[in-house]
Amino acid sequence: MAKITYIEFDGTEHTADVKPGLSVMEGAIRNNIPGIDADCGGACACATCHVYVDGAWRAATGERSAMEDSMLDFAENVADNSRLSCQIRVTDALDGLVVRMPESQH
Ligand code: FES
């Protein structure tokens, strides 16, 4: 299991144990963590699973794919550390990951 901390825009923190193999988005949905809508169910086709990856975790979570990059064009307030959480696969190496949610996914 990887412990992932999801921080809402207002600072509310939620920590969940997420099974390796799931995406960071699925970890939030399965644990009823608010702030990630995931309208497309993880197909990299909606950009409503936008998160900001904590600086310390950017290398471990890897780079955006070209498709993810183009979907992020539809998100608001995109930053250098923006990712689509359905595109980050959880592994044991992500134990301790911290992501922050934007103010809104729409
Ligand atoms: S859930 Fe739709 S792009 Fe991630």
Image (cartoon, rainbow, N blue to C red):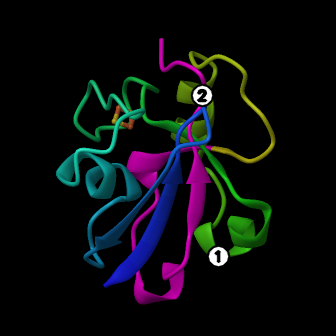
Q: Depth check: 34 or 64 in front? A: 34
Residue 55, given in percent of the width and then of the height, sits at: 79, 62
The residue depicted at 35 percent of the width and 49 percent of the height is: 25
Quadrant position of ligand 1: top left
Assess whether residue 19 is covered by the magenta stretch. no
The residue depicted at 42 percent of the width and 76 percent of the height is: 3
- Crowd rating for badge 2 (residues with CA inside 10 Å; few <14, some 14–19, many 20+): many
Q: Depth check: 47 or 29 in front? A: 29
Residue 61, given in percent of the width and then of the height, sits at: 60, 68
Task: Note whether 49 is above or below 7 in the view shown.
Answer: above
What distance separates the C-alpha of mark 2 from that of mark 1?
20 Å
Quadrant including the N terminus:
bottom left
Amino acid under disc 1: Ala
- Crowd rating for badge 1 (residues with CA inside 10 Å; few <14, some 14–19, many 20+): few
Residue 66, given in percent of the width and then of the height, sits at: 60, 42
The residue depicted at 42 percent of the width and 26 percent of the height is: 48
**Callout 2 secondary element:** helix
Task: Note whether 55 is above or below 39 in the view shown.
Answer: below
The answer to whether mark 2 is within 8 Å of ligand 1 is: no
Write down the residue under mark 2: 72
Write down the residue under mark 1: 60
Question: Which region shows up in magenta?
Answer: 83-106
The answer to whether mark 1 is within 8 Å of ligand 1 is: no
The residue depicted at 32 percent of the width and 44 percent of the height is: 33
Assess whether residue 85 is covered by the magenta stretch. yes
N-term mark: 2 or 1? 1
Q: Depth check: 20 or 64 in front? A: 20
Task: Note whether 99 is above or below 67 in the view shown.
Answer: below
Left or right? Give the position of 48 relative to 17.
right
Q: Are marks 2 and 1 in contact (CB under 8 Å)?
A: no
**Callout 1 secondary element:** helix
Residue 38, given in percent of the width and then of the height, sits at: 31, 32
